[in-house]
């Protein structure tokens, strides 16, 4: 699996995942809402732990990691300084 979740997104997923699991356990919601909140929280926690999101992988979005360089907008071969031309210059 390729890492496609950056550090900031990982922290956000951890916080939201823990919050949703706690909401499911402590808020006294109906069983359907508790189950939905717990499931969503566990998915967020799992993706944060693995640093891989299959939803981001479908369109090829990379938001960090060793291969991604921290930018989800750049494609392989694009230069970070804004010059998107390959090869020599004039």
Image (cartoon, rainbow, N blue to C red):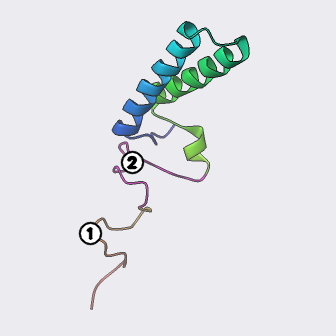
Q: Which residue shows up at 50% across the image and 13% down it?
A: 22
Which numbered disc covers residue 9?
Answer: none
- Residue 74: x percent and y percent? 41, 61
Picture residue at 37% right of the left edge, 31% below the top: 11
Instruction: Classify residue 80 by image quadrant.
Output: bottom left
Q: Secondary structure at mark 2?
A: loop
Q: Nearer the viewer, residue 74 or 90?
A: 74
Residue depicted at 38% across the width and 41% down the height: 6
Disc 1 crowd rating (10 Å Cα; few below 14, some 14-19, many 20+) is few
- Tell me if residue 46 comes above or below residue 29 in the rendering: below
Judged from this view, the residue extending furthest toward the right is: 32
Residue ranking furthest to the bottom: 90
Question: Number of labelled discs?
Answer: 2
Q: Secondary structure beneath disc 1?
A: loop
Percent across and percent down for residue 31 are: 71, 11
Q: Position of residue 21 (x, y in %)?
A: 53, 16
Q: Which residue is mark 1?
A: 81
Q: Residue 41 sits in which quadrant?
A: top right
Q: Which mark is residue 67?
A: 2
Q: Earlier in the sequence, mark 2 or mark 1?
A: 2
Look at the image and give the residue range highlighted in magenta: 59-73
Q: Position of residue 32 (x, y in %)?
A: 73, 17
Q: Residue at x 35, y 38 (%)?
A: 8
Q: Residues within 10 Å of mark 2 (few under 14, many from 20)?
A: few
Quadrant of the rendering where the C terminus is positioned: bottom left
């Amino acid at each position: 699996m390729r890492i496609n979740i950056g550090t900031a997104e990982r922290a956000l997923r951890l916080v939201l995942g823990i919050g949703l699991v706690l909401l499911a356990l402590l808020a006294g919601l109906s069983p359907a809402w508790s189950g939905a909140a717990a499931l969503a929280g566990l998915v967020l926690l799992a993706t944060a732990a693995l640093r891989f999101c299959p939803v981001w992988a479908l369109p090829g979005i990379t938001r960090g990691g060793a291969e991604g360089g921290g930018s989800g907008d750049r494609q392989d071969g694009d230069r970070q300084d804004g010059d998107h031309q390959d090869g020599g210059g004039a």
